Structure formats: C-alpha cells, structure tokens
Amino acid sequence: MPSRQSFRPWGRSAGRAIGVTASMNPVVVRHLSVPMPALAAPGSGLRIAHLSDLHLADWDRVIEGAQTHLLHLKYDLLAVTGDLIDGRCDIGAGVRLVRRFFEPLHCRYGTYAVLGNHDKRELCTYSDLNLTFLNDHAVTIRHSQVDFELAGVEQSQDNLGDVPGTLGLIAPGRPSVLLAHYPSTIYELPQGAVGLLLAGHTHGGQIRLPFLGCIHSADHIPPRLARGLGAVDGTRMHVSAGLGCSGPIQARFLCPPEITILTLKSTILAAEPPKNRLEDIGSAQGRIEANSATVV
Ligand SMILES: [Fe+2]
C-alpha cells in the first residue's frame, strides 16, 4: 500500500489544478455588452450591475460573496430586480440584512430597486437602506452628457404595478432601461417603448439540465428566455439568474448565483464584436470562461 507521503506530489498537483479553476466565491460575474439603439455615442459605456433575487434570510456565503464582488467591481449603477427578502423571513430581520448588504455599496449613480413577489411594500418605507425604490417611477440619469431614462414597476406581494403608467413617465426618444421583477413584463411593452428590460424571478431556472438548460421558467416566458440576454418584438431583455433559491427544492444545479455587468453600447459602436465573458473573480487570479449568452 503506498505510503501517505507518496501521494503528496499528486496532492500538490491536484491542489494547483483546483486552485486554477475553482473559487472560494460561489457567485459568478458575467460581463455582457448590450447594444442600445437610441444611445448617442458619447453615452456609450455606461455600466449597470444587475443583481436580482437575493432572497435574504441569512447572511450566507452566497450573500457574502456577492457583496465582496460588488465592493470590487467597476460599475456606474446598481440595478436590483426584486425578491430582496425571502418571503419566509421576518420583515425586521430582512430589513437588517438588506441594510447590511447595500449600505457599503456605492457607485456613481447609486442603487435602484424594484420589489418582487417575495417582497412586502413595507420595505420601501425604510429610508436608510442606501436604495432608491422605483415603484412605478422613473428618473433621468445624465451620463457623459447623454440623458438615460431609468424606470421601474412594482411587482410586490402587495401590488402589481402600472406598466402603461410607468412607461408614460419615460421621455420619448431617450435611451431607457426598465426594471421589473417578472420577465413576462416584456409582453406588455409596446415595440420601442424601452431600450432594455431588466428582470429576475426565474433564478435562471434554478435547476438546469445538461443539454436542455432551463426546464421551468416559473413565468409565462419560454425557457430559453429564463437567463441572459434575449429579445421579444425588438425589445431587448436581460434576465438575471439571481443569487438565491426558492420553491420546494432549495438548491441550484448548473445555474450558479450571478451578478451581471451590462455595458450599454451605442449601436454605432456595437458593430464591433461584443466581448462577452463569464468571469469568476473569486479565485486568486480570476477565471475566465466562454460565455454562452448571446447578444441580440
Ligand atoms: Fe426569486
């Protein structure tokens, strides 16, 4: 029987191999370029960190990992598309977790959020969360002398928001981003009403199968739209796989928790091939893999 010592070289090699590909941080970071038709060239390059479905109930390693990423990533605006607190969590404990997560996060244009079906409207009454809630509301953000419209619809436990009313707040002709919890909101958007819809809720399918991908989107959308970039009738959409879990199986398979950095590009600049990659920066030197997401 080989001695324990004889295994050491193998152990070191295996350790180095694992060290290259594995990460202590369970949250992956995707980088995607998104063409924006109404975006004048000077405004190109706005970076939106898209976060969704935290399902805060405990301060676990996924939440810790996501916050660590967001403290080190470069982005101009943080957009959160609902399910901040898990529906089973007491609102008081949930608010403390939300405050702990978002309080240290700062970026140029701030953090904007909408509520999801696990969230109670009461969350919006707390003014010390370092969050701006867009409940059927829109704001204008000036980036490199270009005005962006950022709007959000409430889709909480207490209220399904007013999509047409919210769209009416968006100044026509400007590049616009709409936050919603449900990806199926895209079917309520007239063609050209918004440049980009950001949504969550699906958890990317949460359980994905080899070759088949998402088997249950949990929303009225085809499974192929349950994660990543997609489009319906010319409106682009990014659906985040989010961070947390819900449903009878509290687990993910082939669908890691994620944060996405979306870089908005003028369509003039978007003629060059988009540089998309899946990056897990939790490892010591970072890990870069090919990203299967498609820019449409
Ligand atoms: Fe969720």
Image (tube, grey):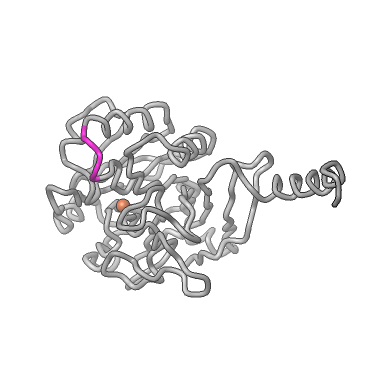
Give the residue at x 22% y 44%: 119
Q: Is residue 213 visible?
A: yes
Magenta: main secondary structure: loop
Q: Which of the two residues, 212 or 185, is positioned nearer the viewer here? A: 212
- Residue 280 on the magenta segment: no
Q: Is residue 221 above or below residue 3?
A: below
Q: Which of the two residues, 48 or 93, is positioned nearer the viewer here? A: 93
Count of picture labels: 0
Q: Is residue 37 visible?
A: no
Q: Is residue 141 left or right of residue 209?
A: left
Give the residue at x 51% y 38%: 69
- Residue 90 on the magenta segment: yes
Q: Which of the two residues, 184 or 166, is positioned nearer the viewer here? A: 184
Q: Residue 269: x and y, percent?
A: 54, 58
Q: Residue 48: x and y, percent?
A: 43, 46
Which range is magenta?
A: 87-91
The residue furthest front is 1
Q: Residue 88: x and y, percent?
A: 24, 43
Q: Is residue 92 left or right of residue 208?
A: left
Q: Residue 46: x and y, percent?
A: 46, 46
Q: Is residue 230 above or below residue 176?
A: below
Give the residue at x 34% y 60%: 202
Q: Which of the two residues, 118 or 4, is positioned nearer the viewer here? A: 4
